[in-house]
Image: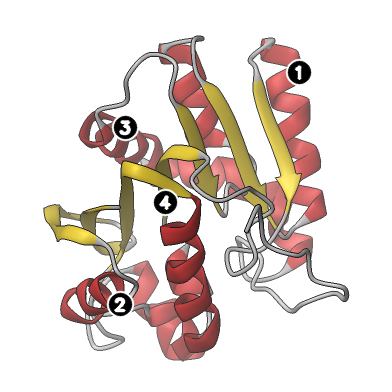
Amino acid sequence: MTGHAHPTHELPYLPAMGRRWLLPLYDPFTRLFGVGRLHEQLLDRAEIQPGQAILEIGCGTGNLLLALARRRLDLSLIGIDPDPDALRRARRKAGRARLPVRFERGYAGALPLPDASVDRVLSSLMLHHLDEEEKTRAMAEIRRVLRPGGQLHIVDLAGSPDDRGLHARLARRNPRRAGDLPDQLLSRLRDAGLTDVGENGRGDSHFGGYVFYRAQC
């Protein structure tokens, strides 16, 4: 198998800010709540090496991959997201900064990449946007596109709507935002056939608790 077929029809997705018309607020919101610091911590944990191919699923407006490109220019960087408006913003930012990042439309459960084609898959505050079936498909797709020895690195929201913080308030309005508890996500990773699965750190922020995860192909 050389790759996954693209969906032949439009699939539903949850936009970065929950509503498409709120997208202009996404970058100011992430700056205000210090998401850039989470990105830097995720990149530190990913142990990225020269010449590697890096994929981000659910790249939004491109902030994580653009931060990585500023660190080093000897990587093959691709971000996928289902939101065409977010991708347009990501491409504009990459063009203005003259950073070599490719952004393509795609879904986490149907990655537009060949088998065993990337060294690292990154995911930042995205998995809680997916429904149960799409999470299962996404894990299988991540396993498919990773090269032997490749790694998955995730930071995502953790906890339940009973917790405090902005994320908890949003989750009470839309339970799909609540995300997996850490044990549930670790089980998903193992069920997908990934190895060396585990947590890689925790923290708290204004929008709630978050957890870093890692796994290997």
Q: Position of residue 10 (x, y in %)?
A: 85, 74
Q: Amino acid at mark 1?
A: Gly
Q: Position of residue 71 (x, y in %)?
A: 41, 13
Q: Which mark is residue 9?
A: none
Residue that mark 3 sits on: 43
Q: Which residue lies at the image location 69% right of the left edge and 53% below the top edge?
A: 112
Assign a secondary structure to mark 4. Answer: strand
Q: Which of the two labelled residues, at mark 1 and mark 3, occupies the earlier sequence position?
A: 3
Looking at the rendered image, the disc whose residue lies closer to the viewer, 3 or 2, is 2
Looking at the rendered image, the disc whose residue lies closer to the viewer, 4 or 2, is 2
Residue that mark 2 sits on: 188
Q: Amino acid at mark 2?
A: Arg
Mark 1 → mark 2, Cα distance in angstroms:
36 Å
Q: Quadrant of the N terminus?
A: bottom right
Q: Position of residue 78 (x, y in %)?
A: 61, 35
In this view, the residue in front, 132 or 172, is 132
Q: Which of the two labelled residues, at mark 1 and mark 4, occupies the earlier sequence position?
A: 1
Q: Position of residue 73 (x, y in %)?
A: 51, 9
Residue that mark 4 sits on: 124
Residue that mark 1 sits on: 95
Q: Left or right? Give the position of 92 relative to 146.
A: right
Mark 4 → mark 3, Cα distance in angstroms:
10 Å
In this view, the residue in front, 205 or 152, is 152
Mark 4 → mark 2, Cα distance in angstroms:
17 Å
Q: Amino acid at mark 3?
A: Leu
Q: Which residue lies at the image location 63% right of the left edge and 14% below the top edge?
A: 99
Q: Left or right? Give the position of 153 relative to 25.
A: left
In this view, the residue in front, 20 or 48, is 48
